[in-house]
Image (cartoon, grey):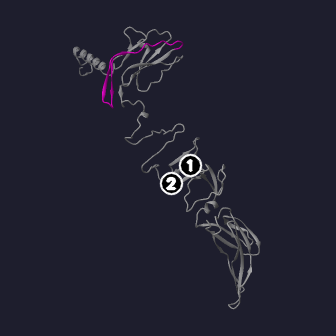
Amino acid sequence: MSKYTEPDYTTQDSSTYKANIDNGFNTFSAGSGNNFQPHEQDTPDMTIILEAGMMFNISAVTLTSVIAQSCGTITAPASNPRIDRVIINQTTGAVSVITGSEAVTPTAPSFTSGSFPIAQILLATSSTEITDSMITDERPSAFVVSAAGMSNIVEDTTPQLGGSLDVNSKEILSVGATDIDLHSGRNIIAELGDASGTNKISVKDSGAVEVASIDSDGDVICNSVTVTNPIVGTSIDIHTTTAETTVADADEILIYDATAGVNKRMTKANLVSGIGGQTVAWVHCNSAGTILDSFGISNVVHNATGDYSINITAGIFANADYGYMVESPYYVSEGVMKAFGIHSISTKTTSTFRLLTLKAEYYSTTTAIAFSSQDREFTITFLGGQ
């Protein structure tokens, strides 16, 4: 093969010009120009011939030469036109034909894995021979096999990235019920690209509706919250054994009971009761026993003068060993010091605390203190009992 020189009749003499034309055709035919070139037989029939060709395997660093070959006999369609596709095997270079489907307006069949396309053949019901006018050349510019023996990416069971993965505005999908698992021997880091809270990691349901998110400021937003593993000083008693099927109301959360496989409802009082050593209930009442503010208290009953029954929300206390503190205003009038405090506890259970209030009076250092029942505004705080 000679060096290719472009023919130019305006500058070259006739001999040089003719020689350059011949060299050009030789260079073209010895390269990719006639590599597996498809065409009709010298005497046309229902086969075509492929010229010799070469395939290069990058992984194996091998060049495979394939001699000229003819395809098998092709049968004409019965009712409507049909397009068949001629291919060669990427490993052996052997030719084969993929038979298409008959149709008024036919389309070519799909490629098969591990093959190179060569040509399409448009057949009519009257076809008795295949000519060049029926053949559409669709050879690639180069016959190169990039991975020896691998036709699909799924065949690589230990893939590794050589650089950053650009998703090119596409999605990473898991079709059906297959999970997408992220496993790391160290941290999994999500960099959201801003520090203003604009970008976020979004969780959406099957209808593409956002149900939860965490933004680049670290703010977490959830339409509903289910706590599966609360971390507190002691265990939290959910105080119910029935499954909850409705959403949580105000001051409530739902806890998933893994053993029972259901959600259970927890009130704010239930949650506080699970934190040992902390204030778990309190109430502020006026002298008539009307609750002004409270937490963990169901109601207060004014039994008589200076006699109050404080009824505690069920489940707040695990035992009656809880502590308490009482406070109330005091006043001085007419030169008499009057005080308020606890006289005695008639009952003290996990559900009821009975408080007796009175006043203490004395008129001089030599006069005995006089006690008498009196309705008074008070605040009582309960602790422990877990």
Q: Which of the pair 382/188 is nearer the observer? A: 382
Which disc is residue 218 wearing?
2
Q: Split into 4 quadrants, where in the image is the N terminus?
A: top left
**Span of residues in magenta:** 52-80
Q: Residue at x 51, y 49 (%)?
A: 200
Q: Split into 4 quadrants, where in the image is the C terminus?
A: bottom right
Q: Are marks 1 and 2 in contact (CB under 8 Å)?
A: no
Q: Which of the pair 150/329 is nearer the observer? A: 150
Per the model, the C-alpha gap separating discs 1 and 2 is 13 Å
Count of numbered marks: 2
Q: Is residue 355 above or below residue 113?
A: below
Q: Secondary structure at mark 2?
A: loop
Which disc is residue 97 wearing?
none
Residue position for label 1: 212
Q: Amino acid at mark 2?
A: Gly
Magenta stretch containing residue 155, yes or no?
no
Q: Residue at x 43, y 48 (%)?
A: 184
Q: Position of residue 311 (x, y in %)?
A: 71, 66
